[in-house]
Image (cartoon, grey):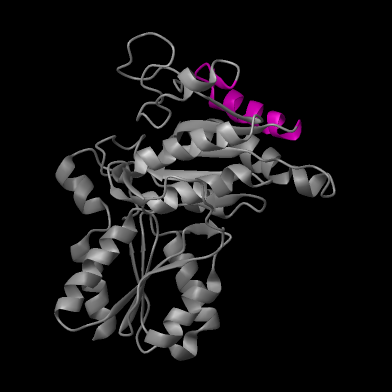
């Protein structure tokens, strides 16, 4: 097993699946070239380098650089999936979903249902999300709740390199449309990742740290922050459990409820605004199905209901940070 970054794990998953299955293709803006490239095809490969080396290995017939038209990218991917291909489409920033959302929620998500189960739509929409990268309000949002509420979509949020590879391989082999959210501040994160291909099932949460005093449910880039807080509490003799759902749809309700039944206290950490967030969704789930287990009110740690600020000090305060998570844990423990 080798140490790889989150970004390298994504790149490796794509290459291994393209070698395994000739029906896997990629399409998107700058996936052959990329910012800072040499100007020749197969330069950097995507704005953050996730597709580095893919064009040079698989060529222009399977790695298709598209015009700057998100609706064309997603529409072409959905159509290609219906014909038997397995497209991996790249939406450079999740913030751009507004110009192609019809192709996602009104087309790809509904094909299997509208055609009586006879149609498959094995497409993956990879997209970069999240604040902390100094991208300002139009390039820094985390919009997973927007996708999660759409029936027919599967939504994946890996929090570490190991999960990034295993979940992406599962996404590529899945017969339904999958939204694969890559959080930008995790790209440089390193971890142990097997060299061979492996799959992580959707809808199976990871108990990233076991504990019995309180439960933290965190998503994506918030998982490492929750783990850091849990480590600090452990030094004080307080055992905090951290649950990483991995996928928001399907959602592993059982693991979340079992954890809350054990600890009796819940903090939910979600990098999205508070209204209609996953924090609100999890809080509602536990209030509905596990209210009798609670020893304290549920606490939600989210971004404020504002656009993402550009000033670095404001952006850092905008995101759920360890201080705010720790305050929420102290509140439920009290």
User: Residue 166 versus residue 103: which sits nearer the camera?
Assistant: 166
Residue 162 part of the magenta segment: no
Task: Please indicate, yes or no, whether residue 158 appears anywhere in the rendered image.
Answer: no
Query: Residue at 67% of width from left, 51% of height from top?
Result: 152
333 in relation to 327, above or below? below
The percent coordinates of residue 201 (x first, y second) are: 56, 58
Specify whether 20 is left or right of 34: right
Q: What stretch is highlighted in magenta?
A: 62-83
Query: Residue at 26% of width from left, 44% of height from top?
Result: 132
Q: Quadrant of residue 32?
A: top left
Specify whether 72 is left or right of 224: right
Task: Please indicate, yes or no, whether residue 202 appears anywhere in the rendered image.
Answer: yes
Residue 73 part of the magenta segment: yes
216 in relation to 219, above or below? below
Q: Quadrant of residue 104?
A: top right
The percent coordinates of residue 296 (x first, y second) are: 34, 86
């Amino acid at each position: 097993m080798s140490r790889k970054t989150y970004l390298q794990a994504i790149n490796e998953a794509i290459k291994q699946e393209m070698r395994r299955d000739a029906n896997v293709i990629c399409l998107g803006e700058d996936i052959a070239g990329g910012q800072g490239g040499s100007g020749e095809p197969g330069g950097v490969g995507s704005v953050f380098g996730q597709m580095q080396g893919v064009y040079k290995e698989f060529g222009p017939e399977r790695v298709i650089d598209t015009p700057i038209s998100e609706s064309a990218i997603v529409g072409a991917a959905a159509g290609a999936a219906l014909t038997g291909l397995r497209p991996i489409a790249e939406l450079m920033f999740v913030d751009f979903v507004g110009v192609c959302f019809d192709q996602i929620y009104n087309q790809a998500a509904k094909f299997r249902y509208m055609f009586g189960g006879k149609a498959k739509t094995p497409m993956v929409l990879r997209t970069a999300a999240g604040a902390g990268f100094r991208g300002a309000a139009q390039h820094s949002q985390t919009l997973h709740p927007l996708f999660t509420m759409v029936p027919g979509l599967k939504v994946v949020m890996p929090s570490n390199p190991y999960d990034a590879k295993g979940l992406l391989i599962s996404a590529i082999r899945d017969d339904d449309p999958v939204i694969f959210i890559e959080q930008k501040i995790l790209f440089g994160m390193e971890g142990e990742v097997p060299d061979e291909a492996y799959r992580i099932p959707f809808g199976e949460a990871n108990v990233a740290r076991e504990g019995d005093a309180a439960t933290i449910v965190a998503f994506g880039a918030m998982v490492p922050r929750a783990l850091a807080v849990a480590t600090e509490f452990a030094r004080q003799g307080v055992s905090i459990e951290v649950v990483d759902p991995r996928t928001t749809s399907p959602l592993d309700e059982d693991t979340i409820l079992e954890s809350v039944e054990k600890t009796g206290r819940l903090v939910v950490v979600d990098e999205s605004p508070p209204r209609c967030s996953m924090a609100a969704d999890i809080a509602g789930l536990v209030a509905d199905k596990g209210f009798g287990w609670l020893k304290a009110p549920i606490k939600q740690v989210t971004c404020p209901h504002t656009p993402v600020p550009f000033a670095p000090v404001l952006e850092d305060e905008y995101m759920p940070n360890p201080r705010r998570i720790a305050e929420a844990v102290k509140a439920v423990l009290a």
